[in-house]
Image (cartoon, coloured by chain):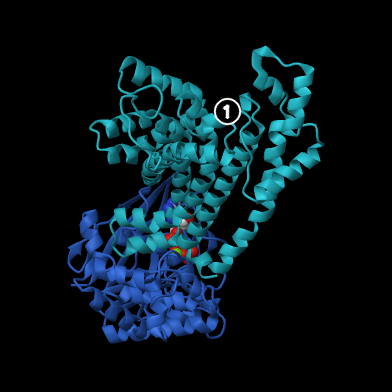
Chain colours: A blue, B cyan
Amino acid sequence: MPLLEIRNLTVEFTTAAGPFRAVDGVDATVDQGDVLAIVGESGSGKSVSMLAMMGLLPWTATITADRMSFDGRDLRNLGARERRKVIGRDMAMIFQEPMSSLNPCFTVGFQIKEALRQHLDLSRAERHTRALELLDLVGIPDPETRLKAFPHQLSGGMSQRVMIAMALSCNPRLLIADEPTTALDVTIQAQILDLLSDLQRDTGMALILITHDMGVVAETAQRVQVQYAGQKVEEQPVRSLFQSPHHPYTAALLSALPERATERRLPTIPGVVPGQFDRPQGCLFSPRCAFADDTCRKVDPPVQGEDMGFARCHYPIATPAKEATS
Amino acid sequence: MLRYFLSRLLTFVPTFLGVTLISFAFIRVLPGDPIIAMAGERGVTPERYAELQEQFGFDRPLIVQFWDYFTGVLQGDLGQSFVTRKPVWDEFFTLFPATLELSTCAIILAVVLGLPAGVIAATHRGKLFDRLLMSSALVGYSMPIFWWALLLIIVFSGNLGWTPVSGRIDLLYYFPNVTGFMLIDSLLSGQSGAFGSAVKHLILPSIVLATIPLAVIARQTRSAMLEVLSEDYIRTARAKGLAPARVNGLHALRNAMIPVVTVIGLMVGTLLAGAILTETIFSWPGIGKWMVDSIFRRDYPVVQGGLLLVAVMVMVVNLIVDLLYGLINPKIRKR
Ligand SMILES: Nc1ncnc2c1ncn2[C@@H]1O[C@H](COP(=O)(O)OP(=O)(O)OP(=O)(O)O)[C@@H](O)[C@H]1O
Ligand SMILES: [Mg+2]
């Protein structure tokens, strides 16, 4: 049984201008110890789908799914109180902006120990020891002093390490990292990613890594899931995705990639992700797709089989990318 | 922190000079003449008038009068009341506890009700409670104080007979003035019913005086909370699995308090201004009523000395608020 299983997750926001479907039938499966990367341009619903799972969306969001289970537990009808016992303990999340993700009014120590106190039955002294241990684990020097520091005294990289320490405090089975390095300097980015990889390997937890950076995907993940305009358009193991992308969107992302990606952002493809008001008929990618024909513009594409990387496309690319683009 | 404190203290000097000048000028720009006011209906002869003018020093140029006043102030001498011939200083401190008691009750009432109301309104944004609270805050803020006071008096004192109309305690109780605070003194006296009577006398004036600060604090708390609730660290707190009460009441409120404390500090000035009106309506024997009476009597030393003391008080409170602000905002504390 997979650790996390999501089938047909849909999130709709009620906005002043009417309903807006930010996530549209997304599937995801994560096994114990898996590393899954989710990539896609801004606005493709990556964060929203993960927040939906954590139960962190505002009340304007309507969440539906055929299946949404974590560790054998159905997340869909889990009461708020029950869910709070899961999140922060077995399922933790870190965010894009480490500097603003820590509460400026409380010390690092307070914020880490608070997570421990919420979920574990530890004495005060044990919590202190565990907090020191955690800071040490995420590579923060001089933990005793750092525990007393306020967030504004930390750099971005330091803050993200503290966030990671906090997320790991109760030994989660799944860590969701939502663009954990986007806001950081390039050199720090690599350090944080290495740290996450190491921690994942050492603890055996599962990791969902949301990112814009194909280079990060190649180095860190085992499987990749590509999302576009709220839909999952392709899913493959990393190696085969880079070798033979089946969805034209994935292919476009990869072909636009410069030699060995060190770019921070995804390469640009002409056009933009459709938003609330310019959702096309048929395939959502059709307006930007080089291969689109009338069928694509009228009929919703089917989801292909595993051999085609579950591509949501009428005409998935069968040949390896190198030949298709050359 | 010490440097922060000293720098705040330094800004006192120009403010203090300004306040001294303004308090001196204020009563003198009002039309009217203290000697005529003192003489009342009887009037005075021109000879007697000139004599009194000389006695009070009104015949000298204003600048000399100001200099006298100012050097007096620096030595802690605020002069004597024209009317009672008692030092302004003594009168002030006899009456001040009454005002302090009333203002303290009012501000406690405003904070104790306003903070939670603002928090609940923010966390239930757009719901019935939020709308009710925001409309009542608007009404409370814009309502004329004396009208509101009279309305309360008519209903609770007149129709229902629950509360007394004026004063600090029933005349049948008499006990020594130990702290000047009626609530404490009545308890110390051990007379049964005295404390209850003191509380009853305090209720209406406190409500009236608390109304505007309550409205302001509730609104300010709500808007500060709304801003804070959309911050990333609130999402982090929720992602830890913390209960909403802890997320809102600790993580959010602690940050929202930073602007709210500033507003509470500013309210102290408003409160003293409000106390003047409230005390007059409820015949509350505090400095508000004392100053209003003195203005009518053109009792120059009382008005200028009283104004100065009130202003210094507001300055001190603001200093305390600044320090408090430093305490709850770690970014300032560590500087
Ligand atoms: N609370 C909300 N109310 C309405 N719309 C929202 C809300 N939160 C997100 N959205 C919309 O949902 C869509 C998907 O947002 P999401 O944050 O999941 O994108 P993303 O893939 O994470 O992008 P990025 O890479 O920029 O983080 C966006 O168009 C966004 O505007
Ligand atoms: Mg995002």
Residue tagged by mark 1?
B292
The residue closer to the viewer here, B185 or A303, is B185
Q: Measured along the vertical axis of the image, is residue A260 above or below residue B113?
A: below
Q: In the image, residue B190 lies at what x, y percent?
A: 25, 38
Crowdedness near tag 1: few (<14), some (14–19) or many (≥20) residues, C-alpha within 10 Å = some
Q: Is residue A228 visible?
A: no
Could you tell me which residue is drawn at 47 percent across and 75 percent down?
A: A181
The residue closer to the viewer here, B217 or A256, is B217
Q: In the image, residue A44 lies at what x, y percent?
A: 45, 62
Q: Measured along the vertical axis of the image, is residue B176 above or below residue A138?
A: above
What is the quadrant of residue B311 in the picture? top right
Q: Measured along the vertical axis of the image, is residue B216 above or below residue A218?
A: above
What is the quadrant of residue B110 in the picture? top left
Could you tell me which residue is drawn at 79 percent across and 37 percent down?
A: B62
Q: Residue type at mark 1?
A: Val
Disc 1, SS: helix
Subunit of mark 1? B
Q: In the image, residue B78 lies at what x, y percent?
A: 63, 42
